[in-house]
Amino acid sequence: MKKFLMALLFAPLAAWAAGSVQLDRWPGSVSDKAALQNGAKYFVNYCLNCHGASYMRYNKLLELGLTEQQVKDNLMFTAEKIGEPMRVAAHPEEQKKWFGAAPPDLTVIARARASADGSGADWLYTYLRSFYRDEKRPTGWNNVVFENVGMPHVLYELQGTQVRGANHKLEPVGHGQQTSEEFDKTVSDLVGFMVWMAEPQQEFRQRLGIGVLIFLALLFVVAYALKKEYWKDVH
């Protein structure tokens, strides 16, 4: 058990160090509120069963354009009050017994996975689309981006089944409920929600940054004109 936990702990570092996987660029945007709402739906239905988002409260979802009643009716399955955090239903002790280690909290996963090879959004977008069948693994699944990952492919019913060919490329062998284009859009929306969840104020921060730069540019013009006025008689 100790060896398993150590391997689970250092597996992300080994995968990162390998650096052999070209990450696909995430095509989404946190400005698309409809996509974020769709991503929240998939997150609650497919991710929140095992992974928590304990630093995010349900009432924060109102900023996506949802009403309080919509959140309560469609997204609140593990809480009674809308001000409660988005915790997973299972207890960490139970998860350790089932999986060997408790699945990580996903509140800031989109920021934690950022690296020199790409953003956290790029990593998540590529990772969630890169599962393949591997009978040697306990779950029956493996992943090109994160080799020997302990997580099963929870979205396989939507995507279908893939295998890793002789050329190490993924090849579909079974159809899912969605087409390839539809599944890519689903994953993009899901990743978009996790990107937004990691920093809900990022749009405001970006707008504020642009405003500050504009103010500094105007201030420079005024300061330069004032400097010329003060020093015009100095030879």
Image (spheres, rainbow, N blue to C red):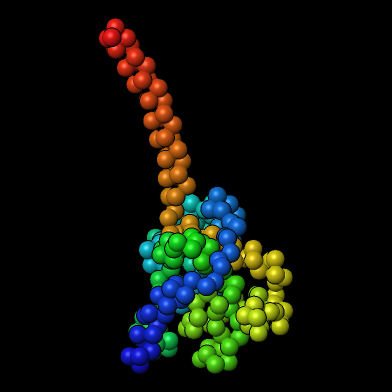
Q: Position of residue 120 (x, y in %)?
A: 47, 63
Point 68% across, 79% down: residue? 171
Q: Nearer the viewer, residue 211 or 155?
A: 211
Image x and y of residue 182, in percent:
69, 66
Q: Residue furthest front?
A: 235
Left or right, residue 146 beside residue 220: right
Q: Nearer the viewer, residue 67 or 27?
A: 27
Residue lying furthest top in this view?
Answer: 233
For the N terminus, the quadrant is bottom left
Asked whether residue 211 appears in the rendered view, the answer is yes
Looking at the image, residue 173 lies above or below residue 112 = below
* Residue most extreme to the left: 234
Q: What residue sits 41% from the left and 29% below the top?
A: 217
| Numbered-mark total | 0
| Whether residue 42 can be seen here | no
Residue 229 image offset from top left, x and y in percent: 33, 11
Quadrant containing the C terminus is top left
Q: Residue at x 65, y 75 (%)?
A: 158
Frontmost residue, 139 versus 235 = 235
> Can you tell which quarter of the image residue 17 is in?
bottom left
Q: Is 28 located above or below residue 106 in the figure?
A: above
Up the image or down, 50 lies above or below 30; here it is below
Residue depicted at x 42% and y 35%: 213
**Residue 10 appears in which quarter of the rendering?**
bottom left
Report x, y in % for residue 114: 44, 62
Nearest the viewer among 135 and 228 is: 228
